[in-house]
Structure formats: structure tokens, C-alpha cells
Amino acid sequence: MSIKPPFTEIEVKRAASGFYQGHSVEIALFSKAIMVGLVLWALVWPANANGVLGSLNWRLLEDFNVFYIVIVGFFAVFLFVLAALPQTGKRIMGRPGEGTEFSNFSWFSMMFGAGLGVGLMVFATAEPLGLWGSNPVVISGAVQGNTEEALQSAYRYTFAHYGFHAWAIYVVTGLALAYYAYTRDMPLTIRSALTPLFGPLMNGFLGHVVDILGVVATILGVSVTIGFGVSQFIDGMYAITGMEWMMDMTGEAPAPGTVGLISGLFVIMGLSVISAVSGVGRGVKYLSNLNLVMSLILLFTFVVFGSFLFAMTTYATALVDYILHFLSISFGAYGPQDPAAFAAALPAEAAPYADALRGGATNAWGSFDGFKSGLEGEAAALSDEVLAAAYAAGEPGRQFGWQAGWTTFYWAWWIAFSPFVGLFLARISRGRTVREFIVGCLFAPALVCFAWMTVLGGTAIDLELTGNANGAIIGASNTAKLFVTLGQMLSGGFLSAITVMCVVLIMTFLVTSADSGILVMNTIMSGGDQEVGNKHKIVWGVILTAVIGTLLIAGKTNGGADPMEALKSAMIIGALPFTVVMGLMCVSLVKALYRDGKREKLGLTVGKSAE
């Protein structure tokens, strides 16, 4: 029995001279055209851009919410199976006899570093607190939000959004890139992961499309991360200086204003570009170590002054609860509730008022009291018993709205971020087995995230449960919750010192994230080459700044309450095509693993030497 060697001759046509020397002109120009077009649209017609992006985003969620939920569940199960099967789990991502590039200690240290970042700085307190007030169990009416009974379900979904599901998304991309790079000597670029399915087609137009989708997803994923981080950076600067010009003081709680956000964005991106072009980027390793030290100081502060016993008890019970509900979270997807289905579920007395009742009954962010107070005319005169039944009839619609607006947003964000994180995971994992890669990259960072969420978030919840915070943390904006929690825990000079450290930590996380994001985009456009010219770093730094800035401005048009809305909508839209690419990566990897196993049995080598 013979089996032909794998296709490994990826040839990304790169310019031999000129401005784009070493880059694929097609990938660079098409990627820039998409991003510049988005920038000009948001700059010239911000209201139109915000409205269209929001409408298109919601339409896609209505049609593809089930797809997003199910495929992420599939990613997690797919990786568990690959790790568990002896014939796939033991395969080494490297040449025969090749050892690992990093020691286990260094490798896990980098995993822990990967588990910390801007997202955790923003959402370590915001995510558990938000889910404590609203999650599927609260929406079903089984428990009341912001109570002790809601704590278990709050952390169930907190762990889902930052746990094994989230890291499964990164690991799918990272595993595919690492496998082909280290067993077949192929470039670390997205198109390499689809060669078992499409072969030489990856050297042409189809390969360009795949890489462009990776670049666009990366830009939008990094943009959302930086957008949240800049918002928290401005909240921290306000906490230190009290300068109100940075803030929007018109709401119930101060929130970063457009002027403050754009100013902070220019500072962060300016530092990122300077870091990238001046050679300071070579010290990112040391900056990352500094980030880790400051992160541990912050964590230790919460351990000493926060609710550590409450947090550790929560960690243990929440982890067990998350594992028990893993499959239901993975595949329990909702679609939009059809008006006819809602009407059919109503009691007879409420059926004539189906149209008037449906909006409030299916509103995932409302409450039964809000539903009742929003009714007018004859519908408002219905008895409480009938209205309660009408509200219960809208539960499927509320569950869909919540899942699409919360879980699916996270899945899209992680998918858009997966070329960025996946490439990092692949770079540091030469010589690892498939099982080592999955277990190390999936579980180690997730466990760090769990600890971060329970120690910081658990302290914030405990302060609210005991009444010490008196609603101050819940009432703060998401990006301000960390600083408000610190203010409830600490006082005096120590509070000031920790707040300043947090602002520095956020800034360094942002600079390294933006710097690394620019490097990933250029790596894809250069066919896997990690050495790129400074001019390209500057150009993409400017484009990234323009994308974030214009969409932040667009998000505030027409009375928009959240400047991040346009950015989030663009990211979810941009992530959908790359989700399809990731699904194909899984199919491609199965084929590669199966056929490489066959080749080994026949005594054939796997990489380029087989040809």
C-alpha cells in the first residue's frame, strides 16, 4: 500500500523590491483596503456606520447564534478527543528526535503570562458581578439576581467565558499552526493549516482569502481588547488625578468620555509604535516579566485585604459546577423566538395583546417589574397572574437575547483574537506532543483565569453581599469596577500606590498587546516571516489606531451610550468568516493526523524530505 506525501510547498508570492519588499502585495493591499474603507465610513458617516454595523450584527446573531455556540462546543470536545486518543495524543510536533525548545517551567510560565492580560484587568471584577445580576438561571426565574443563590450560576458562566471553552478556541488555531510548522516545516501562517484539504490551491487566490480573513479578524479582535483597555486606563487616570475632562459625567456614574478615550488611545498606540520600531520591542520579554510581577502583587493584595476564604470556597464549588454543566453550556444554543410561538404560549386572556406583550417579555436585559411598568392600555390592565404567565412565555426569547449578547460576543471575541494568541502558543511549543500542547495550553491558562476571577471578582461580590459596598461596585461602569473595589478595600497612600500600579500594569499590557498584534499581522502578510520592516509596523500601527478611534467615535453617535458598541459589532461580523476557517482547520488536522499515522506505519517521513 502506498500513500502520497503531504503537500508542503507553500509559496506566498512576496515582492522582491519596493515598499512591500518581503510582503505579499495582494494580502497587504486587500487587508488595508478593508480597514481603510471601514475607517473612512466610520469617519465620514459615523451615525450610518454605527447603525448599519449594529443592525447587521444583530441579523447575523439571529441567523448564526446557534452556529457560534455549537462550533465552540465542538472545538472543546474535538481537542479533548485528540488528547485522549493514544495515536494522536502522543504525536510530537517536531522532527524525529527533536527536543522541546523551552523547559517545562519556562513553558508553563509563559502559559500563565498568556492567561493574564487587559481582558482580565477589565473583567476580573466586571464579569462575575455582571453575571451575578443576569445569567440564564436568573432569566429563567429560578433565582433572583444579586443574591447569594445566584452566585453559583454567576461563576458557572464566568468560568465558561474565560475557561476551557475560551482557551479551546485559541488552542485549535495554535495546534494547527504548530503541527504543520514543526512536523512539515511549513510557514507559521493561516493558509498552512488548510493544505491537507486544498493542497496547491493555498498558493493562489484561496490562500490569500484565508490569510486576509486572519488579518481582518486579528485587527478587530485586538481593537476590541485595546478599546476596553484604554477605557479602563482612563478610569484609572481619573481615579488618580480626578480630571473630569476625560470623563462623561452625564450618566449615573462617571464613564470615560470620547475626548478621554481618544487621548488615551493616542498615548497607548504612540508608545506601541515607538516600542515596535525602536528596538525596545526586543525587551518585551522583560516587560512581560514585569507585568507578571505587578499582576502577582495585585493578586496578593486581594488575597491579604480581600475575601480570600470566600474566593477559594467559590473557586472549588464553581469549578465542579462548571464541569458538571460543561456539555449543556457547550451545546445549549438558542435561536430567536418566533412571534407565532410566543403568541401560542400565551394564556387565552393575553393572546389578543401578543404584540404589545412580546417586546418586554423577550427583553433579556429587563425584569418582570420592568415588563409590567412598560405596558400601556388594556395590556397593562391584565392581572398579575396573567402577566406572569405572559412573561414566562417569553423566556426562550430572553434566553436567546442573553446568549447572543453575552456568550456569543465572547466566542466571537476569542475567535477574532485566536490568530494572535494561537500564533504565540505555536511559537513556544516546538517539540511538544499534541497531548502536552492541549493539556498545557488549555488547562494551565484557564486555571489562572479562574483564580483571577474568583479572588478579584469574589471580593467585589462579597463586599456587595455583606452590604459594605452598598451598591457602589455594581453601579460603576465595567472598566471602573476594579478601581471602585480597591477603594472599598483600601485607603490612604497604599490605595494610591496600588491604583498607580494598576494604571501602569494596564498601560504595559496594552503596549505589549498592540505591539504583538502588529507583529502577528505582518507575520501573516509576509508568509510567516517574523522579521518585518519598521515602515510596515508604523503603517499598521496607524491603521489600528484609526480603526479603534473612528469606531469609538461612531459608537457615541445618535445618543449611543456605549462607545464600544460599533467596535464590538464590527468584531462579531469580522469573526464569522474566520469561524468557518477554524472549522475547516479541525477537519484538515484530522486528515493530516490520520494520514501521517499511515505514513509512519509505512516508514515514510512526514515533512518535506518525503517528497
Image: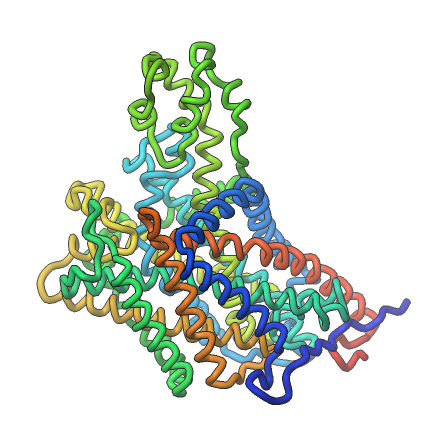
Q: Residue furthest top?
A: 349
Q: Position of residue 493 (x, y in %)?
A: 10, 66
Position of 236 relative to 386 (above/below) = below
Q: Position of residue 419 (x, y in %)?
A: 54, 66
The total of numbered circles placed on residues is 0
Q: Position of residue 27 (x, y in %)?
A: 61, 72
Residue 221 seen in this snapshot: no
The residue drawn where x is 33% and y is 37% is: 150
Q: Position of residue 174 (x, y in %)?
A: 57, 66
Coloring scheme used: rainbow
Quarter of the image where one finds residue 498? bottom left
Q: Residue furthest right?
A: 1
The residue drawn where x is 25% and y is 53% is: 481
Depth order, front residue of 341/454: 341
State the quadrant of the C terminus: bottom right
Depth order, front residue of 568/134: 568
The residue drawn where x is 20% and y is 54% is: 484
Q: Residue furthest front?
A: 44
Quarter of the image where one finds residue 506? bottom left
Position of 379 relative to 219 (above/below) = above
Q: Residue furthest bottom?
A: 17
State the quadrant of the N terminus: bottom right
